[in-house]
Image (cartoon, grey):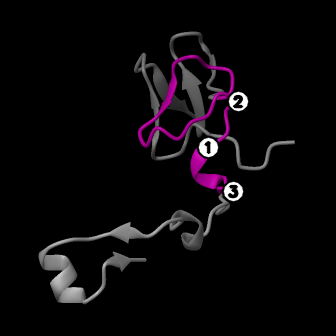
């Protein structure tokens, strides 16, 4: 099942690389194949925002699934030894 919306030829970001897209009686028509334009099956379909996916789905309509696996505490494993000016300013030999 498709999670996002399918790309359609009346979208303002849709573009035909062959420049063969025209509109006849309110329907998108491909002058190259003399058939109705279907971006899902067309190899010349392109999105100006570069969001058209392989299966014809618009990438702008899909929500991202992101997950943080690491916490900031996991990055700090060991103490860092300091010398010189930094040690004098902080008053400590190690930080973190």
Q: Position of residue 29 (x, y in %)?
A: 57, 25
Query: Observer-nearest residue: 68 or 58?
Result: 68
Q: Nearer the viewer, mark 3 or mark 2?
A: 3
Spatial separation of the CA atoms under disc 3 and disc 2: 19 Å
Q: Earlier in the sequence, mark 3 or mark 1?
A: 1
- The crowd level at tag 1 (other Cα within 10 Å; few <14, some 14-19, many 20+) is many
Q: Which residue shows up at 59% across the image and 45% down it?
A: 59
What label sits on residue 16 in the rendered view? none
Front position in the image: 84 or 38: 84
With respect to residue 89, does 16 lie above or below? Answer: above
Residue for badge 1: 58
Callout 2 touching callout 1 (CB < 8 Å):
no
* Element under disc 1: loop
Q: Which residue is mark 2?
A: 55
Instruction: Decide which of tag 3 and tag 2 comes sooner along the chain.
Output: 2
Above-or-below relation of 39 to 7: above
The number of numbered discs placed on residues in the rendered structure image is 3
What secondary structure is the stretch in magenta mostly built from? loop
Q: Residue at 36% of width from left, 76% of height from top?
A: 94
What segment carries the magenta color? Answer: 40-65
Label 3: element kind: loop
Q: Is residue 68 left or right of residue 47?
A: right
Describe the element under mark 2 as helix, strand or loop.
loop
Residue 6 included in the magenta stretch of the image: no
How far across and how far down the image is residue 69, in percent? 67, 60
- Residue 65's disc is 3
The Cα–Cα distance between marks 2 and 1, rounded to whole angstroms, is 9 Å
Residues at circles 3 and 1 in contact by the CB criterion of under 8 Å: no
Foreground residue among 86 and 70: 86
């Amino acid at each position: 099942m498709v999670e996002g919306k399918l790309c359609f030829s009346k979208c303002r970001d849709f573009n035909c690389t062959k420049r063969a897209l025209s509109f006849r009686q309110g329907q998108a028509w491909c002058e190259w194949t003399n058939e109705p334009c279907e971006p899902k099956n067309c190899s010349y379909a392109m999105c100006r925002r570069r969001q058209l996916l392989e299966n014809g789905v618009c990438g702008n309509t899909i929500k991202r699934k992101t997950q943080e696996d690491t916490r900031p505490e996991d990055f700090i494993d060991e103490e860092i030894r300091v010398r010189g000016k930094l040690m004098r300013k902080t008053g400590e030999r190690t930080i973190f």
